[in-house]
Image (cartoon, rainbow, N blue to C red):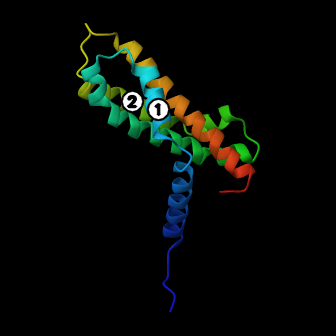
Amino acid sequence: MNDVISLKQKRHQKELIYEKKMLRELSLTDIKKRFEDCFGFFEKGKKEMIEDGCIDFAIEAYLLGAKYSRFGFYGESMEDANRRCWIEEKRLVDDLFDYFINWGKLNIKDISFDEVFLVCEYYIQSWWKQGYIKGEKRYKMRLH
């Protein structure tokens, strides 16, 4: 006898399968390299403390971009698709910035908070773009 599954559960299962497929294309070395490029100005001890959290934020931004790449497949530009998810992206940027303030133990003497916020914004946007591009490619190749 078959189990009855709600539409919400089915969508969630399908989304998890898609995220697993997208994560296969993501490399930890790429994440660490971009982390080093963006946040290399921190002291070595502070970088090691915040690296794991930044990896998590990179994955979240990547998956968010991949999720919204569906709209690009149907004809929207990347900028329009990005505007659709600006609230979620803004939340990721704010959370990453808060993470730096709390776990990175930043002082105003160390570096300007504005600079850190801009770097956080760039980091999230760059991972969102990469997820969007790879997701759109998967849609075009009908691998979704």
Q: State the image coordinates of residue 2 (x, y, percent, origin top left).
A: 51, 87
Q: State the image coordinates of residue 13 (x, y, percent, origin top left).
A: 50, 65
The answer to whether 34 appears left or right of 76 in the picture is left
The answer to whether 68 appears left or right of 121 in the picture is right
Query: To which residue does mark 1 refer?
Result: 90
Secondary structure type for disc 1? helix
Q: Which mark is residue 94?
A: 2
Distance from label 2 to label 1 (Cα)? 6 Å
Write the residue at 77% across / 43% down. 75
Farthest residue in the bottom direction?
1
Write the residue at 41% across / 13% down. 115
Screen quadrant of the C terminus: bottom right
Q: Which mark is residue 45?
A: none
Q: What is the crowding at mark 2: few (fewer than 14 residues within 10 Å), some, or many (at least 20)? A: some
Farthest residue in the front direction?
29
Farthest residue in the top direction?
109
Write the residue at 75% across / 48% down. 74
Along the line of sight, the residue nearer the viewer: 63 or 87: 63
- Amino acid type at circle 1 is Lys
Along the line of sight, the residue nearer the viewer: 23 or 108: 23
Find out whether the residues at labels 2 and 1 contact each other: C-beta distance under 8 Å: yes
Secondary structure type for disc 2? helix
Q: State the image coordinates of residue 26 (x, y, percent, origin top left).
A: 53, 43
- Amino acid type at circle 2 is Asp
